[in-house]
Amino acid sequence: MKRKHSYLLISFLVALFFMAGCSVENADTSSADWAYSFVVWDDYIYQIGNEYVQEVDEEIGQVTLYSDMEGSYAGNFSNEYEKGTKYFSITGISTEEAIAIKEKDGQYRKAIRDGKYAGR
């Protein structure tokens, strides 16, 4: 009788193991696991850092599309900031090096250029 219970327990655990593997494999993938937060401006990707800047120059653009879904997008795309978020040049720094992103609280977060955007 003990042997029969042991087989049932082992069979149950094996079945549970396989069901758990299937549920992870078919899990909801509605949002992407981006390597970092970024914006795209003028066909270049800028990585969002933790640094804020005080001196901004002129407005140079804005987010035209926000998405946290993996894919290739056209325009001034971001996986962090919503549509309409403004981009600014930083006083004394070339836009080839960095730009500033105006946050909702009025602060400007520095974004470092990371290369050509490989989207559309």
Image (cartoon, rainbow, N blue to C red):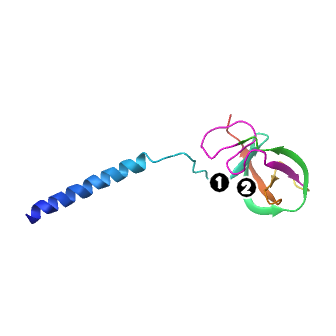
Apparent side of residue 7 relative to residue 114 in the rendered image (left or right): left
Q: Residues within 10 Å of mark 2 (few under 14, many from 20)?
A: many
Residue situated in front as seen by the camera: 97 or 65: 65
Residue drawn where x is 15% and y is 62% of the image: 6
Amino acid type shown at disc 2: Ile
| On screen, residue 22 above or below 2 | above
Residue 25 on image: x %, y %? 41, 47
Q: Secondary structure at mark 2?
A: strand
Residue drawn where x is 74% and y is 37% of the image: 75
| Residue 28 at least partly seen | yes
Residue 44 on image: x %, y %? 75, 43
Q: Where are the magenta residues, as a range? A: 66-90
Circle 1 is placed at which residue position? 36
Q: Residues within 10 Å of mark 1 (few under 14, many from 20)?
A: few
Q: Who comes first in sequence, dot 1 or dot 2?
A: 1
Residue 85 on image: x %, y %? 78, 48
**Callouts 1 and 2 close, C-beta under 8 Å:** yes
Circle 2 is placed at which residue position? 48
| On screen, residue 74 above or below 78 | above
The quarter of the image holding the N terminus is bottom left
| On screen, residue 37 above or below 50 | above
Residue at the extreme bottom: 2
Q: Give the quadrant of residue 13.
A: bottom left
As for residue 65 lying within the magenta part, the answer is no
As for residue 83 lying within the magenta part, the answer is yes
Residue 95 on image: x %, y %? 84, 49
